[in-house]
Image (cartoon, rainbow, N blue to C red):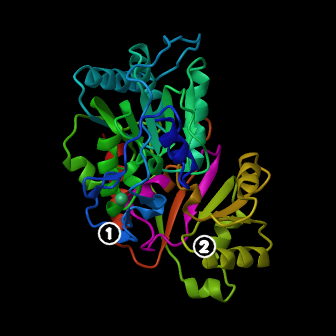
Amino acid sequence: MENIYNQLTLRKHNYIEAKFTPIKMINFGKCLRCGNRDLTINNGVKSCLNCQELGLIDQFTYFYTLPFQNYPKDYQKSDNNLLLTKMQIKASSFIVNQLKTNKNCLIWAVCGAGKTEITFQAIECILQKKLFIGFAIPRIDVLYDVYDRLKQYFKLVEISLLHGQKKINKNAQIYVLTTNQLLNFKDAFDLLIIDEVDAFPYEYNQKFEYATKTSTRKNGSIVYLTSTPSKVMLEKQLPTFVISKRWHNYLLPVPKLEFLNYKLLKNYILSPYILYLLLKLDKQLIIFISNISLGYQISKVLNFYNFKNTFVHSKAKHKRKYINAFKDQKINILISTTILERGVTFKNIDVWILDSSSSLYNIASLVQIAGRVNRNINFQNGQVIFFYTTINKTITEAIKQIKYLNNL
Ligand SMILES: [Zn+2]
């Protein structure tokens, strides 16, 4: 056995730690990570191209499995109080009740409702039973945020933070991981919490759905958290709890619609309406744009008119630094691609989506972006503007969803 483990740790993917029981990812003629049966054979070695964006695997790559059926240590509660709103308490008990019957459930909570904390009571139940928890999140920046909040509340519990560049902590009882990493686990979690899975395209979701089943133990439960459930998610007809109010009980801002002529921007002209808005701007502003080169163009135009601004996108250097500077209110106008779409909280901002007609947005992302505004109880005057060339179905559906939640 020792030998196999040594070989495994030498392999390029290094998916396994010495204590873990090896389970092959490709076996029985299919890829057990994504469910694909159409394997590629090269020099007699089978591999799966269907999920290669998560790292190419072959018949010698192994799943993560947890070393024990039960966690060896007793749960130690730390002396932390959890302050929840009435709605959060109700949602929290709802999940705990679902766990009793091992049922999966859905929490549909508006952006800013405090979704993470709603799961803490359920997590505590699982910890007390000496079982395991997975908390899967699509985005790395949100991953760190959730990790910090869990760490703060469950001070004495071992928590592993796991993403592509991070090694697993095999002694952990809670695993906070990217949804991609989830695909590397098998029969590991008794409670799996999945945050914002609807943010992803359907094709990805299929793979992911397979992974949620694979990574969860037989009697395990799955809790889906979402602010913007897809049709597919709603059609599953899971027991659902809806929180239509944000934690501070204020409504979500309904986006305004404004036509924008992009030709003007290309000619360094700002429309009178945009100029007017910029001149009377009394708070910070995030301008969302889906396209990097258009982002640079807008940045140049704003500079031309002497509106100081910073542009951040996924490939920008020092983007963390600029986002933090914006948080600290050292930058007034931040232009951003969808990297700031979710998970981040700013105190007092307006939000514009400059190209809301772009096909790169879906309903979920438009609702999420609108949800960046008015998150702080003391600042409720932020406004959201969707600039458009045509009002498409995505835009109307997003606004419909926001109004629906506000009217519940
Ligand atoms: Zn695969």
Position of residue 35 in the picture relative to residue 124 (left or right):
left
Position of residue 167 in the picture relative to residue 112 (left or right):
right
Q: Amino acid at mark 2?
A: Tyr
Is residue 344 one of those drawn in magenta?
yes
Along the viewing direction, whichever of 326 and 143 lies nearer the viewer:
143
Tag shown at residue 14? none
| Mark 2 element type | helix
Q: Quadrant of ligand 1?
A: bottom left
Along the viewing direction, whichever of 244 and 44 lies nearer the viewer:
44
- Tell whether circle 2 marks a residue whose Cβ is less than 8 angstroms from ligand 1: no
| Mark 1 element type | helix
Please say if 213 is above or below 294. Answer: above
Position of residue 23 in the picture relative to residue 297 (left or right):
left
Residue pictured at 42% horizontal, 17% vertical? 130
Please say if 133 is above or below 309. Answer: above
Along the viewing direction, whichever of 3 and 231 lies nearer the viewer:
3
Q: Position of residue 313 (x, y in %)?
A: 64, 65
Q: Which residues are magenta?
A: 343-368
The residue that disc 2 covers is: 273
Circle 2/circle 1 CB separation < 8 Å = no
The residue that disc 1 covers is: 393
